[in-house]
Amino acid sequence: MATVPTCTSSAMHPSTVQGRGVGFPNPFSYFENELKLSLEHGGVTHDLIGDFREPNEYPENELVAIFERMEEGTWLVSTGTERSFFNLLLAPVDCQGIIVRDINPKVKAYNDCVTLLLRISENREDFVELSSFAFFAPAPMSIAMKSKTDTIQDRIASDQSMPIGMKEHYQSNLQNLTEAYFGAQRAWRWKKDYNNINYITNEKQFYKLRSYANAGRIITTTGAINDLRSLSSYDIRVGVVDTSNICDFSLLDIKVEGNPPQIIWTIVGVTRTRYHSYTAQNLCPEDNAKLHGLWEQIKEQWNTARPEDSFPQDRLIQYVRPFHRKFHGGDPHTPFPSATRETLVTLERFLESPRK
């Protein structure tokens, strides 16, 4: 597994991060403030979504092939917990970093905790010790857990390379972060399906992630993944967006500035995960507005016909998706629903076709 490139001089950028042997051009003056927004939704609970902190999608060869097509010198955007770290391990050597975007604040808190432990650990064995703890109920905190968080607080306080804003964030939110992380089972560590991307046991993979963490290039935020245009303000070019199976629950409409990235979407099966990708399509404003209007029209019809269904969109998607496959020859290369020409055709034909 290739490691992250390092630079020998800070001359390549006036704000280059030099920490523990890692050098990166670091244009993220906003990063410290962004990191402090960890719990912008107020706490680490979200009643409208499931708790998906434990990974359930196993990396396959298709995923490696997708990352091989990633544009040179670009960033990876991902959703989820460990899958985001797995993606970073599989990304090419010149990947500039990862931005994790998820609507669940628990996911952000979990990922912030992993990033913190990567930063403050002395080596892989130390990381394993710091990150190992059996599943526990968040309250009351056990004596053992109190001892562990005290150790982590001491490491944060003594870390001279950690920016002040980042340090304040970790110190003030540590209980929330550790509850989100240590409160998850994290059984993936012992599953053979993850042997090839297990940074808990693989020295080279651990140091690759640690290099990104030390350079401030694992950035986690809370929110929807669709609109990523603001990243261009920080000279961030997006090469790949991993959306997991978000299209099972809502319409994908990925928007970025610059060259369209590769969009990864998945179908999760009982024994394996099928990874698909397509190049993001820039529909003209008229077609994009038409697509959203047709989707809202179908949702309104669905809600009218099923008033007892309090959260219908995921079930509506499962209902319409077979029509999408039928209209496009069995296995379309773009997901449904998404801001693509294929979905636009599907919505038009669905509204025109007779149905029971």
Image (tube, grey):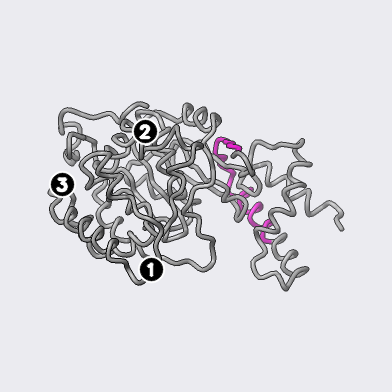
Look at the image and give the residue range highlighted in magenta.
Answer: 274-296
Tell me which amino acid carries mark 3: Ser
Q: Secondary structure at mark 1?
A: loop
Classify 221 as above or below 24.
Answer: below
| Viewer-nearest residue: 132 or 255 | 132
Q: Secondary structure at mark 2?
A: loop
Q: Where does the N terminus fall, quadrant-wise?
A: top left
Q: Which residue is mark 3?
A: 161
Answer with the quarter of the image where residue 135 lies: bottom left
Q: CA distance from mark 1 to mark 3?
A: 28 Å
Q: Nearer the viewer, mark 3 or mark 2?
A: 3
- On screen, residue 302 versus residue 285, left or right, reads right
Q: Nearer the viewer, mark 1 or mark 2?
A: 1
Tell me which amino acid carries mark 1: Gly
| Viewer-nearest residue: 129 or 234 | 129
Question: Is 269 in the magenta?
Answer: no
Classify 137 as above or below 184.
Answer: below
Answer with the quarter of the image where residue 218 lies: top left
Question: Is 285 in the magenta?
Answer: yes
Identify the mark at residue 43; answer none if there is no mark: 1
Q: How many marks?
A: 3
Mark 3 closeness class: few <14, some 14–19, many ≥20 residues within 10 Å: some
Q: Earlier in the sequence, mark 1 or mark 2?
A: 1
Q: Which residue: 36% across, 64% down?
A: 39
Q: Which residue is mark 2?
A: 95
Q: Secondary structure at mark 3?
A: loop
Q: CA distance from mark 3 to mark 2?
A: 23 Å
**Is residue 27 among the parts visible in the rendering?**
no
